[in-house]
Image: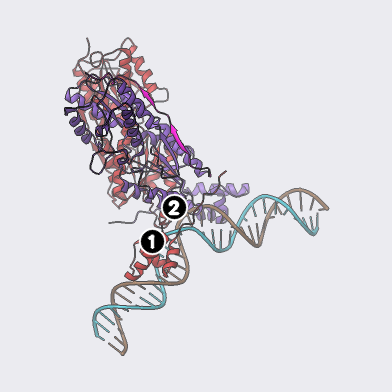
Chain colours: A purple, B red, C cyan, D brown
Amino acid sequence: MDQSPPRSPSVTVADVARKAGVSKATAARVLGGYGTVSDRVRDAVTAAARALDYQPNELARSMTTGRSGTIGVVVGDIENPFFSLAMRGITDVARQAGFTVVLINSGEDAEAEKAAIRTLLAKRVDGLIVSPAKESDVGHLREAARAGRPLVLLDRGSEMLDVDMVIADDRHAAEGITRRLIALGHRRIAYLTACDTPDHRFRTPSDINTGSVRRRIQGFLGVCREAGLDGMEDRVHVGAVTPEHTHRIVTGMLQSSQRPTAIIASDSVIGLEVFKVCRALGLSIPDDLSLVSFHDADWTSVTTPPVTVVRQPVYRLGETAAKLLVERLNGNHAEASRVVLQTKVIERASVAEAPV
Amino acid sequence: MDQSPPRSPSVTVADVARKAGVSKATAARVLGGYGTVSDRVRDAVTAAARALDYQPNELARSMTTGRSGTIGVVVGDIENPFFSLAMRGITDVARQAGFTVVLINSGEDAEAEKAAIRTLLAKRVDGLIVSPAKESDVGHLREAARAGRPLVLLDRGSEMLDVDMVIADDRHAAEGITRRLIALGHRRIAYLTACDTPDHRFRTPSDINTGSVRRRIQGFLGVCREAGLDGMEDRVHVGAVTPEHTHRIVTGMLQSSQRPTAIIASDSVIGLEVFKVCRALGLSIPDDLSLVSFHDADWTSVTTPPVTVVRQPVYRLGETAAKLLVERLNGNHAEASRVVLQTKVIERASVAEAPV
DNA sequence: TCTCATTTTGAGACCGGTCTCATATTAAAA
DNA sequence: TTTTAATATGAGACCGGTCTCAAAATGAGA
């Protein structure tokens, strides 16, 4: 079955050289734009190249130079607007800097992520931008870094790794909205995330491998504790990995006797699903339930009511990560930097006083 | 500035061969998984490779095999949920088939697209999936196809090109919703698209270079004509390239004396903006204005009212394109196929009878 | 006109794999 | 045991560029 492709015999520098009547080395010089060549020869070679429709082979070039001109990006799920926007930031910077981007979806699966990194390393990408599924399990990342491939962590840092990282101040944001909810009289506040644990239950923040989310939960729990609210660990729900899962979880919690009066959704996809379930259940936002969502997705301002969100500088997250990487690639050997971008709570109308 | 990267001296087959005490050719056989080797030698080489932590160099492999194991994808804007979802379909299939994906954003700019194709070709991608910005201007695509690189067109076909393409039956969908609107008494129906023309005005469908959109407009105008509505060309608005542009255009049309009673938005990003402008202007959907949007973005069902949309099988668009490409890469030499996926109108509540 | 520095050019090794082809080894058949 | 076929291994060319190094050409100064 695996028939060999046509392999149209592409024209090489040697072909151009022959046609131009010069040596391969000389032709390579003008075609590759390095070394010095006389004007006459340059013109001759250029003409020959055009006549033959010469197309350079980047692969061969990379072979000798050791630089492939590509950066590998591993994200959880490109379909999620969070990542697609960050990706836009990355590709914009990459293109500007003359790099091309290889994208791999990990599906938030650590094994898939490992395979992805291996593939990318084998393809000799010049550097990597990764949004690690599990921060605890970073052997493969350390290895990549050790292999001399600059690595930048996106949205999720890791204390265990001494590499560049760009994150948002999730903890601070979570603290802010939790305080606000508590000030409004909410006591039964639920936190809902897509991150999962082996038994789909949450006990302590260390169960959560996704750094950004762990920091949010830490912030959330911390403020609750300060306010004298205990046992809020039980109000943290994990495993909202698909809209269907989310639907089931939210329906369950909203139908329980001690149902929450406020929900914090860890991303816009989850926030949207919460919204849908409320509709289905005939619950009113914010009268029956207050809702705050992370990620200021574009639609959040047009719902009724518009939803209060934590605006993260998502595009800039990607952009900054790419910039950091490009700097490394250009020989910046300074020590690893940890960039924390500010978030902002956008107050809209999905939050109100807790019902009595 | 451009310091050479560390270039950690990676271990090669030759190194492994030496360590295992066999020839380079033999080591390559077991490492590359081809040819026949005795069990004893295989073990020895495997052990040596492990000891040295051998990492294969795909670049070198591609060099000789002529296959890079990558496919290039050029889309308008990965940030647009339409493309990010299609991209998900592509990456899923690609991964399954053992290919990796190189992504380039064209920004719907024909020149950028040309550059992208050139880059991709230079990197020796095995095949291409492109969502061409302009269908009329396909020289670079034809060239790619001629260079022996299979090409699949995504969402936008082209009669001028004899290559595989996967599109949605946009025309049919547009006809359906236009009929429906007319049946409800609408006469002033506007069509709004991001596609632009040199002077930002629309005269005839041939002004539109994006095939999918052109087909929709043709369907729209065709039905209008059938129904005796003339001069609807003036109701087609182009250039809604950013939310800001869209805002301006929509505000303008809704404040004119002969303002439309219905708007067809060519994608969900535009639909969202129309929604926002109505809010800002205090217009009620669907009482003052009926709205239909292409692309069943997830949020469209939670607005008040939820919006009637044309559901396109976006994921499957990408998935199918990738499948077609992989088949070609596996040696399918059948003639070019043109896959048309069905769309479906999801009736929600943003459409009502025309106001009197 | 001749020397010396400078610029151009060419020959060929090299990157790290694959792959062909000849040789060596082993197993099976006579 | 000898012949024959099948299987394993090694030597080295090759992919299409880059790059080093030495030879050749050019130009300035004496």
Residue A332 covered by magenta stretch: yes
Q: Mark 2 points at which residue?
A: A10
Number of residues whose C-alpha sits closer than 10 Å to that of mark 2, classed few (under 14), some (14–19) or many (20 or more):
some
Type of the residue with mark 1: Arg
Left or right: where does residue B103 sit relative to residue A41? Answer: left
What range is drawn magenta here?
Answer: A331-355
The quadrant of the image that shows the C terminus of chain A is top left
Asked if one can make out residue B194 in the rendered structure from this viewpoint, the answer is: no
State which quadrant residue A209 falls in: top left
- Label 1 marks a residue whose chain is B
State which quadrant residue A131 falls in: top left
Measured from the top left, where is residue A106 in percent x and y? 32, 44
Name the foreground residue: A183 vs A352: A183
- Label 2 marks a residue whose chain is A
Element assignment for label 1: helix
Measured from the top left, where is residue B307 in percent x and y? 24, 23
Q: Distance between the residues labelled 1 and 2?
A: 37 Å
Number of residues whose C-alpha sits closer than 10 Å to that of mark 1, classed few (under 14), some (14–19) or many (20 or more):
few
Left or right: where does residue B113 sit relative to residue B335? Answer: right
Relative to D15, say whether B178 is above or below: above
Relative to B120, say whether B48 is above or below: below
Q: Name the residue under label 1.
A: B50
Type of the residue with mark 2: Ser
Left or right: where does residue B239 sit relative to residue B344? Answer: right
Element assignment for label 2: loop
